[in-house]
């Protein structure tokens, strides 16, 4: 206290007093009177202070009498931070004090525990009775809108917490306690907690716990879990070494692994707890894409044990697709072992059935990945982004669950797309960890072919290799004889964007190799329609991001500035070639394989937005006009 002023006024045995000061940085004042006689009477007319930014004030005048070692407190109401506490009773060798708590904000405690972030309001009653040397305390308290900074960050909605019971003889007796919230949490219980002699525990807890309480934590791992669990628990032992027993049961849950696109529906789970162990006696679910999973195992739950796990998961007739590149049927057994709080390991064997790796045929060449940066994003957006961010290799390998999974596929690994149809087999090993997984190994060619405009080539050798990335690398070779030339077609590069290249003996340019392979003739002797078909084949093989050198060579070989090949509505082929005659004149010629499909167009730019355009088709139609165009 500092800057204290004291004013006293005495009249007979009555002394009035007024005190003003600063306490803990805030203003404080008290006004009242002392009356001496057989008993000491303290009358308080007004009192207020601000402590740790919490306003505290006496609502109305009150009185305290002290006589023969006993203090009697008249009903006294203190306004605290928007709520109030009403206290009355007697204190001496024997205690009989009661307090009523009315809408006191829980945020008051934040002034004493920085970062706690408590919210909500507290109501209830507290009574103290019995000998001062060994009092008993009764309580009936509820905290509505209860939340802490940590629960908020995990996405747990505000709760309603209740507790009723008594403290006596070094033991807290809970006649009842409970917790509920809008996410479906509903727990209740009773029992005892010792605060002396080792802190013995004797609690029972029953009710329902929604998996939504784990949403925030699981989202950081790219996992979404919905549903709830019915719990029936008994907690014994001591506060230093609790012993938890009972059961946890769940039906109808759903688990989604965002990075891999996997979802497990209708999850049934039975867990028995006892002897510091959680024993999974039943675990089953249905994969959304087909197939089932089941499992069993144990997790140690002794305090300080690190939660050692020994779990097994059996996958049967599962179907998986990443929605872009791979579709497969699989089965196998996966294990999880080690301390869950340290570096556990996932191991086991997965056997692949029929698997199809699809090479993208064609995507708009203008599509590129947008570099989106989230700045000052709220917590729910950050959780959503984490759940939707795919796992990629090459990141920080210092965290995550260790991986050692063997993937067997002796056959039926099909690679298809852009005329390619090949079967491979082999095995790979997934290593690293879940934060930075790596795939090592390769699948080797069993059989395969490549078809280009009706010309079929047989692959003589090929591999699909994994060297860290989940996207395999293709290295395949097909050979064919074309007139006096031996043609080799190479398919190399990542499976989502491989490169098709052509070699020959004797060595020829790629366009010549392709012309001889498909038509058995030199490039210079091809007709316009054959050139168009050749361009269509080149475009199909190139795909998005593939080699466009064949198309460029075709443009150069026929002396045009642009060439485009399209499929017509009736399934035919149409080729369009364009040429600048000068800076202002551009001519296009279009020809399909149907009669009357040819047409020529001339565009003459007169300047200042004026253009003359004329068109003539090979069926005798013609037209033209003057146009004014302007860009805004």
Image (cartoon, helix red, strand yellow):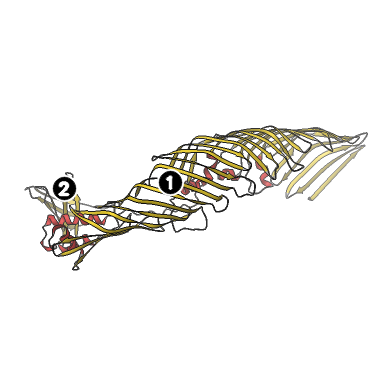
Q: Nearer the viewer, residue 217 or 159?
A: 217
| Residue, far bottom | 506
Camera-side mark, 2 or 1: 1
| Residue, far front | 410
The residue drawn where x is 33% and y is 55% is 495
The residue drawn where x is 81% and y is 40% is 31
Is residue 188 left or right of 99 when viewed as pictured? left
Q: Nearer the viewer, residue 496 or 77?
A: 496
**SS of the residue at dot 1?**
strand
Q: Earlier in the sequence, mark 2 or mark 1?
A: 1
Q: Label for residue 332?
A: 1
Q: Nearer the viewer, residue 474 or 632?
A: 474
Give percent across and percent down for residue 73. Answer: 82, 33
The crowd level at tag 2 (other Cα within 10 Å; few <14, some 14-19, many 20+) is: few
Give percent across and percent down for residue 288. Answer: 41, 39
Q: Label for residue 572?
A: 2
Query: CA separation, marks 2 and 1?
Result: 47 Å
The residue drawn where x is 74% and y is 49% is 24
Q: Nearer the viewer, residue 121 or 350?
A: 350
């Amino acid at each position: 206290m500092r800057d204290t002023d004291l004013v006293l006024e005495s009249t007979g045995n009555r002394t009035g007093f007024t005190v003003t000061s600063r306490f803990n940085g805030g203003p404080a004042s008290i006004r009242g009177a002392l009356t001496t006689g057989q008993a000491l009477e303290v009358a308080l007319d007004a009192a207020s202070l601000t402590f740790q930014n919490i306003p505290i004030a006496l609502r109305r005048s009150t009185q305290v009498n002290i006589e023969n070692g006993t203090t009697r407190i008249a009903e006294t109401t203190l306004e605290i931070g928007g709520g109030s506490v009403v206290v009355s009773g007697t204190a001496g060798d024997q205690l009989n004090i009661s307090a009523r708590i009315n809408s006191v904000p829980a945020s008051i405690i934040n002034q004493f525990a920085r970062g706690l972030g408590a919210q909500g309001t507290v109501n209830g009653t507290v009574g103290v009775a019995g000998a001062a040397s060994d009092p008993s305390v009764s309580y009936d308290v509820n905290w509505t809108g209860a939340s802490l900074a940590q629960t908020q960050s995990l996405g747990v909605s505000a709760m309603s917490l209740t507790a009723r019971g008594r403290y006596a003889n070094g033991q807290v007796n809970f006649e009842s306690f409970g917790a509920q919230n809008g996410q479906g949490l509903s727990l209740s219980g009773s029992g005892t907690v010792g605060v002396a002699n080792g802190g013995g525990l004797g609690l029972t807890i029953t009710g329902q716990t929604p998996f939504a309480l784990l949403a925030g934590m699981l989202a950081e791992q790219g996992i979404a879990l919905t549903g709830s669990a019915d719990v029936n628990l008994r907690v014994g032992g001591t506060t230093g070494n609790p012993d938890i027993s009972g059961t946890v049961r769940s039906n109808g849950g759903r688990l989604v692994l965002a990075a891999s696109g996997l979802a497990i529906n209708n999850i049934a789970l039975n867990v028995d707890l006892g002897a510091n162990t959680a024993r999974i006696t039943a675990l089953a679910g249905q994969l959304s894409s087909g197939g089932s999973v089941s499992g069993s195992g144990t997790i140690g739950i002794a305090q300080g044990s690190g939660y050692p796990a020994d779990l097994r998961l059996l996958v049967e007739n599962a179907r998986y697709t990443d929605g872009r590149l791979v579709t497969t049927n699989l089965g196998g057994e996966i294990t999880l072992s080690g301390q869950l709080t340290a570096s556990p390991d996932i191991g086991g064997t997965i056997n692949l059935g029929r698997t199809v790796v699809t090479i993208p045929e064609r995507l708009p060449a203008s599509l590129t990945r947008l570099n989106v940066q989230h700045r000052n994003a709220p917590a729910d957006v950050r959780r959503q982004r984490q759940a939707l961010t795919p796992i990629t290799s090459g990141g920080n390998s210092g965290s995550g669950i260790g991986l050692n999974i063997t993937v067997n596929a002796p056959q039926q690994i099909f690679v298809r797309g852009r005329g390619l149809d090949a079967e491979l087999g082999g095995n790979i090993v997934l290593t690293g960890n879940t934060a930075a997984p790596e795939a090592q190994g390769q699948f080797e060619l069993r059989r395969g072919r490549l078809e280009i405009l009706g010309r079929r080539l047989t692959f003589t050798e090929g591999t699909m290799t994994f060297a860290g990335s989940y996207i395999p690398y293709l290295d395949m070779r097909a050979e064919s004889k074309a007139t006096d030339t031996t043609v080799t077609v190479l398919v190399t590069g990542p499976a989502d964007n491989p490169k098709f290249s052509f070699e020959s003996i004797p060595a020829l340019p790629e366009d010549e190799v392709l012309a001889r392979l498909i038509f058995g003739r030199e490039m210079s002797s091809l007709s316009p329609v054959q050139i168009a078909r050749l361009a269509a084949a080149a475009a199909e093989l190139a795909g998005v991001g593939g080699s466009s050198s064949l198309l460029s060579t075709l443009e150069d070989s026929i002396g045009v500035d642009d060439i485009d090949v399209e499929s017509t509505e009736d399934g035919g082929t149409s080729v369009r070639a364009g040429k600048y005659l000068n800076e202002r004149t551009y001519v296009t010629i279009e020809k399909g394989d149907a009669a009357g499909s040819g047409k020529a167009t001339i565009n003459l730019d007169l300047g200042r937005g004026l253009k003359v355009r004329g068109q003539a088709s090979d069926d005798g139609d013609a037209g033209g006009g003057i146009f004014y165009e302007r860009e805004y």
